[in-house]
């Protein structure tokens, strides 16, 4: 890749699916924008960080999208949904819900990076209880957790906020929580600290 001046970092992945996967066409397309000595950073939220020339951002994103890659902003935004690997079988019906939730929330600006996780069954492979907001599918309904913190000496498991939600209730509740955080959160205040300050009950009042 030629040096084209200022670069910006974007996040990419193969979208929401049965596991975090990339195909050969996607890998070849990504490699076009890497120098031989450059490395890709794989985040814990199933994203790859790549730096691209800012002046060609729109064209490159369009090219990425043409091969099925999904692009997200990097920084203080809602991360794309972290999911379990979906066991297909009886849990396959949870896939459309995960995709719809991701499309509604990923990339929204927030005071500090917000991580949302989804898991298709109580085994919890998507680690919803270790994320800021976690969704667990239980048969035909959804339980919603908030306040998980995976790192640090004050690491904490998320708390059940609401249960037995329908898909529409789930979408609306998660969007409402993110809107409250966006409006009332202080600059660079983590969601974990935000909850400690305002209290979980405020989210469902």
Image (spheres, grey):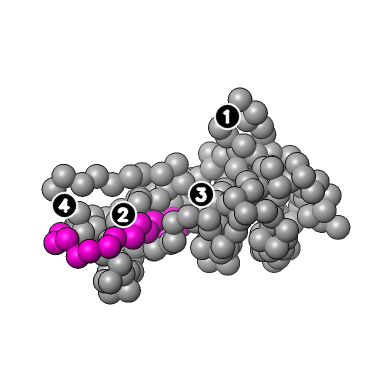
Q: Nearer the viewer, residue 127 or 96?
A: 127
Check if residue 110 falls in the magenta segment.
Answer: no
Q: Which is nearer the N-term, disc 4 or disc 2?
A: 4
Query: Magenta residues, as a range?
Result: 1-17
Mark pair 4, 2: CA separation: 11 Å
The earlier-in-sequence mark between 3 and 1 is 3
**Which residue corresponds to mark 1?**
152
Q: Earlier in the sequence, mark 2 or mark 1?
A: 2
Q: Work out which quarter of the rendered image holds the C terminus and state it.
A: bottom right
Left or right: residue 30 compared with residue 129: left
Secondary structure beneath dot 1 equals: loop
Q: Quadrant of residue 61?
A: bottom left
Dot 4 lies on which element? loop
Asked whether 145 or 196 is in front, the reply is 196
Does the rendering let one see residue 152?
A: yes
| Side (left or right) of 75 relative to 200 | left
Question: Does label 3 or label 4 sit earlier along the sequence?
Answer: 4
Residue at mark 4: 35
Spot occupied by residue 171 in the image (x, y as percentages of width and height) = 66, 63
Whichever of labels 2 and 3 marks the residue nearer the N terminus, that label is 2
Rounded to the nearest whole Å, what is the CA distance between mark 2 and mark 1? 27 Å
- The residue identified by callout 2 is 50
């Amino acid at each position: 890749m030629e040096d084209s001046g200022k670069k910006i970092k974007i996040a990419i992945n193969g979208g929401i699916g049965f596991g975090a996967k990339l195909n050969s066409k996607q890998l070849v397309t990504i490699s076009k924008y890497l120098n031989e000595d450059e490395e890709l950073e794989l985040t814990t939220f199933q994203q790859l960080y790549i730096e691209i020339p800012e002046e060609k951002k729109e064209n490159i994103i369009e090219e990425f999208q043409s091969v099925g890659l999904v692009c997200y902003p990097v920084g203080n935004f809602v991360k794309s949904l972290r999911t379990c690997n979906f066991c297909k079988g009886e849990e396959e019906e949870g896939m459309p819900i995960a995709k719809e939730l991701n499309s509604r929330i990923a990339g929204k600006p927030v005071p500090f990076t917000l991580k949302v996780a989804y898991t298709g069954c109580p085994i919890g492979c998507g680690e919803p209880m270790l994320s800021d907001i976690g969704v667990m599918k239980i048969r035909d309904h959804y339980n919603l957790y908030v306040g998980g913190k995976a790192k640090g000496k004050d690491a904490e498991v998320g708390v059940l906020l609401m249960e037995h939600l329908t898909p529409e209730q789930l979408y609306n509740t998660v969007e409402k929580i993110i809107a409250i955080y966006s409006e009332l959160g202080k600059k660079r205040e983590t969601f974990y600290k935000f909850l400690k300050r305002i209290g979980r009950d405020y989210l469902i009042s």
